[in-house]
Amino acid sequence: MFYEKLLNMKDYIKKILYFIIFFALVLNMTHKLNAETYELKDVLAKIEQNSLEIVNNKANFESIMNETKSNLAWEYPYFEGTLGGVNEGSLSSGATNAWGASWSAMFLVKPKLWWVNPLLQESLQNKGVQYQKNYELIRNLNFIGAKRIYLTYVATKEKYQYYLKREENFLQLLSNAKKRLEGGSISRKDYVSFQSAYIDSTLATIAVRNDLLELQRSLYVILGLKNHEFISHFEPPNMVSDTAKMPQNMAVESSKKQQEIENLMSLSGYDLDAFESNDSMESSLNNTENKGDIKINGLEFSYVEMGENALDSKLANSLYIDILDAQSKEYQNLAKYEGLNHWGSLEMGGGLDYSLNSYNPKVQVSIPLPVTKKQTHLKAKYMSLESGALTKAAITKKQIAIKARAYLNELELQKKYIDVAKNNTDVKSHLAELNRLAYETQQVTLFEYITQANAFVDSQIELVNSQIKYINLVALLEETLGESFIEIGEIK
């Protein structure tokens, strides 16, 4: 009886230990695949903190505002004085030949005329409108760029997994070719061709990994992540399940893969140079903590649907046009200001003259005579700038409309391309599955099976590439319109 209770207790303890081990493994995997997550509001905050364009725009605006306020203020008043002497004997025949002091003191100002200052104040308001519109445009363009980079990054991670699968398939072909070479069924030339194909697939995989690192570097710059490590493990996306359906007898153990590659690339007696594969790199990819991955909630691949009315509405409220309109209004006010500012150097003041023991009040006025065309030319300068801004606004509006409609047509065509690519992937998937079953029943050769498996992987890569092209087209359309299809103002 006691023995049975002891056995039951041992079983119970084993179950507890198994549960603890399982729970620890789950926590470990979660930690390894844990990506740093951001919300859209966090991304916007990071953009405003780290965008050089936004910082420069704010600094320029504050500089221009202070300069305009300085122009609105009066010039410093100033004091003007003279000191001298006078010979009293020279002024009257009865006076002795004596000398006396004389002096003059004046207080002068350069006033700002009341009919020109309101024009400067209106110009100041227009500068504020320009700054706000410029700020919104720069923020929108930075957000559009961040969205494009992030979505391309996510798609490239998926593409990278397909390239790894493709490389593995070529390794299987190379392994089979080695056996056939040793058996005498293929020539050395044929084997080197398989070797070259595997090297090409490895180079392609490394190139895609470099693309990923470049995209991650761009994200780090946008988000200002200076102390973060670069990615060491890419979380595999939800890949089509058929890509993982490899025959059991074709599986290659990870611990033996590097040695097998070395054996394949350097066969004794055939004088083939050894090739250092990137297996160690792939091992680190799959076994190192994912400290550098980034995820942004709310940013996902989606299609753009925009009718003619929606496009006309966006064209009517384009930030590009608003900025040019504000510039034209500013030039208009400055032209009026220069047309009225003929007496900008007007001076007036008063003071005292002292001479011969008497004080004499004095008033002084300096009035410029606008007899030249100086102000006329200044007025013409700003009128030309106003006309240019209005013309630029009309041309820009036309160009935006042309580009936007062209991008919408390209997006519609690219969407159809993606749909066809998806159908092609489905067909290739079905065909790869049929070849897998045929290979397991020895109805097709390994070469035929792997070739079809690679065709399926290539179709998946092409599908991702078509989605990346769609992402870039959406970004070009958004940049043309000056705003994202994600309403930034509604992000909280």
Image: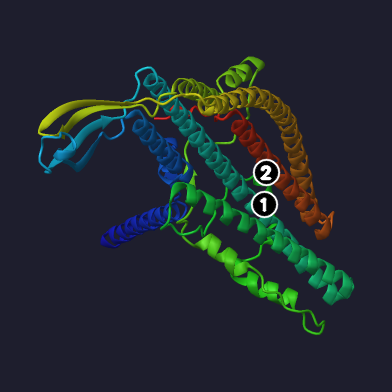
Mark 1, residues whose alpha carbon is within 10 Å: few (<14), some, or many (≥20)? many
In this picture, residue 263 sits left or right of residue 122 = right
Quarter of the image with the N terminus is: bottom left
19 or 278, which lies in front?
278
- Report the residue marked by disc 2: 464
Quadrant position of residue 12: bottom left
Label 2 SS: helix
Q: Which of marks 2 and 1 is in front?
A: 2
* Residue 141 horizontal/vertical position (percent): 54, 36
In this picture, residue 101 sits left or right of residue 199 = left
Vertical order, 117 against 302 (above or below)? above
432 or 30, which lies in front?
30
In this picture, residue 164 sits left or right of residue 451 = left
Q: Residue at x 10, y 41 (%)?
A: 96
Vertical order, 263 against 40 (above or below)? below
Label 1 SS: helix
Q: Which residue is drawn at 69% across and 29% down?
A: 403
Looking at this rendering, what residue extends furthest in the front direction?
93
* Residue 268 horizontal/vertical position (percent): 77, 83
Mark 2, residues whose alpha carbon is within 10 Å: few (<14), some, or many (≥20)? many
Quadrant position of residue 302: top right
Looking at this rendering, what residue extends furthest in the top direction?
309
N-terminal of the pair, mark 2 or mark 1, is 1
The answer to whether residue 47 is seen in the rendering is no
* Residue 71 horizontal/vertical position (percent): 37, 31
Q: Do the residues labelled 2 and 1 touch (CB within 8 Å)?
A: yes
* Residue type of the residue flagged with mark 1: Tyr
* Residue type of the residue flagged with mark 2: Val
- Report the residue marked by disc 1: 162
Q: Residue at x 71, y 40 (%)?
A: 466
